[in-house]
Image: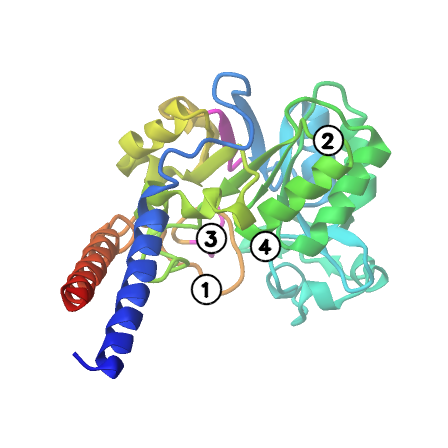
Amino acid sequence: MSCYSCIITVLVALVSFVLGASLFVLLFAFQGTGPNKDCAGSFGPVTYLHRGNLNFAQENTFDAVVNGAALQGMNPEIDITALSDGSAVLFHDKSLKRITGVDKLVEDATLEELLSTPISAVIDGYDYGSTNNITEFLPVVKAICAVEDISINFDLKMTEAIDPVVDALVASDCTEGSNIITTAHPNVVHAAREALDDAGREDLRIGAYLALPGSGEYYFLGIKFFLKTRLMHALPRFSGSDILEFHASVYEHEKELIQKWRDDGWCTGVYGIKPEEVGNYDVDVYIVDEGPSFPDLPYEGYGGDGEPEPIEYKNGTDNSLLFYYLFIAVAGVLMLVFLICFALLVRLQK
């Protein structure tokens, strides 16, 4: 074997080993990872009203989350979006269009502009009878925290919303034990954990929820891949959560995998359910849709950006472990290549 061939063989061996070993680590090393702090059995069960009480008023309004939820003895879940001027409001969508009719991104607006933009009387085909107002974040938190034994589920849509939430918690002295932060974005989880710890709020739980089934959020990998590997909850730059949250259809199909998380100390939470369905799920956190039937939403649930789509835990995508086993096979082939190259180099030394 020539010197050039030796160099190529060494390089192939090194690359094969590094790639193969890395794949094995990613696929197996985090499967037993526990939460940031043991949660199962020490938190909940607690129920939050998704975007407030939508039977009372339009979503994420003061009327829905304070008057319709907190003052009625129910815990609200609220969506927080940060604005270009550094303030924050309660708003779910990226665009103002569905809620106000204005075709503009929420984060590009100023607080003054939003407070003067009325919320439509008709939302997703349901007529509330009157318009409403977009709600500034800090005043609503103070109002909720002033109600005894009421907790808030803060749903963060972006990292820029972290500081307003932490500042509001500190300013309002909102210390109810069932306050939690939730987000669908792993990078937000880690940043929020650091911010809470720095503010002395290590006690606050963080939930990281899996995207809607059928949304294609995880491309070809699917939801089950991340339930199995726990990569989105356990990798160092994504870590910091205590609660695994998922849509009701995921629970119905993956009870065994979800139970493994609970056995490792995680709390679990379910969303996409009606109040009368709470008893069907054995979890710690319930995010309940307390609202009317919206004529423009044929698949039930609540509205968002874009056209409504069916929420379905899809065979062959969401529930597939095809790429999990494919990656194992690829890792195995790479390690085999490494062994072959290593054998050739040992033979050459002789």
What's the amino acid at mark 2? Arg
In the displayed structure, 305 sits above or below 209; it is below
How would you rate the neighbour count of disc 3 (Cα within 10 Å): few for under 14, some for 14-19, many for 20 or more?
A: few
Determine which of the numbered discs, if any, sits on residue 307 in the image: 1
Q: Earlier in the sequence, mark 4 or mark 2?
A: 4
Q: Earlier in the sequence, mark 3 or mark 4?
A: 4
In the displayed structure, 119 sits above or below 194; it is below
What's the amino acid at mark 4? Ile
Q: Find numbered disc 2 in the image and state the secondary structure of the residue it sits on.
A: loop
From the top left corner, tell me how far across and down residue 40 is, in percent.
Answer: 48, 21
Front residue of this view, candidates 341 and 57: 341
Q: Find numbered disc 1 in the image and state the secondary structure of the residue it sits on.
A: loop
Q: Which residue is mark 4?
A: 123
Q: Which residue is mark 3?
A: 295
Q: CA distance from mark 4 to mark 2?
A: 37 Å
- Predominant secondary structure, magenta span: loop
What's the amino acid at mark 3? Pro
Q: Is residue 253 visible?
A: yes
- The C terminus - image quarter: bottom left
Determine which of the numbered discs, if any, sits on residue 201 in the image: 2
Task: Give me the residue at 71% from left, 51% from top.
Answer: 161
